[in-house]
Image (cartoon, rainbow, N blue to C red):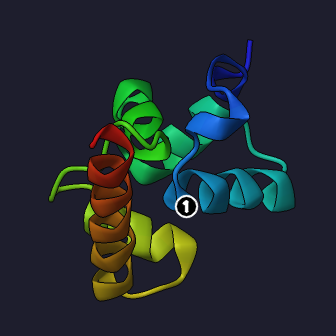
Amino acid sequence: MNEFNRIKSEEFSEIGLLLLAVMDNNDLTFEQLANAMDISKAALRISCQKQGNPGQRIIPKLAEILDCTEGEIRRMIRENQLEQMHEHN
């Protein structure tokens, strides 16, 4: 079973949606993407969800796989955190 199937569409973060597009465009499974990034499936799943943000070790790997800068990844993380704070207040 594809790990993304366990995440509801409304639970995806901006990073998660971008990673989903990478998987679709490159015909990759969740496990193949995690292996390509040299991270666990759990770390990838957390990085894809609004409720979980990637750790510092994963940011460079996300930037590489998404073809963007680490600053752009950090911006997406900050925006996700602010959105989550707003939704819970």
> Residue at left 55%, top 72%?
66
Q: Position of residue 38 (x, y in %)?
A: 37, 45
81 w.r.t. 38: above or below: below
9 w.r.t. 14: above or below: above
Q: Nearer the viewer, residue 69 or 13?
A: 13
Residue 67 image-quadrant placement? bottom right
Q: Position of residue 13 (x, y in %)?
A: 52, 51
Left or right: residue 3 compared with residue 39: right
> Residue at left 52%, top 68%?
65
**Which amino acid type is marked by label 1?**
Glu
12 w.r.t. 31: above or below: below
Quarter of the picture containing the N terminus is top right
Q: Position of residue 21 (x, y in %)?
A: 75, 59
Q: Position of residue 69 (x, y in %)?
A: 38, 88
Q: Nearer the viewer, residue 31 or 71?
A: 71
70 w.r.t. 49: above or below: below
Specify the farthest residue to the top: 1
> Residue at left 44%, top 28%?
41
Left or right: residue 81 compared with residue 20: left
Which type of secondary structure does the marked residue at label 1 adopt? helix
Name the residue carrying label 1: 14
Quarter of the picture containing the C terminus is top left
> Residue at left 39%, top 71%?
76
Q: Nearer the viewer, residue 9 or 27?
A: 9
Left or right: residue 69 compared with residue 30: left
Q: Residues within 10 Å of mark 1 (few under 14, many from 20)?
A: some
Residue 70 image-quadrant placement? bottom left
Residue 72 image-quadrant placement? bottom left
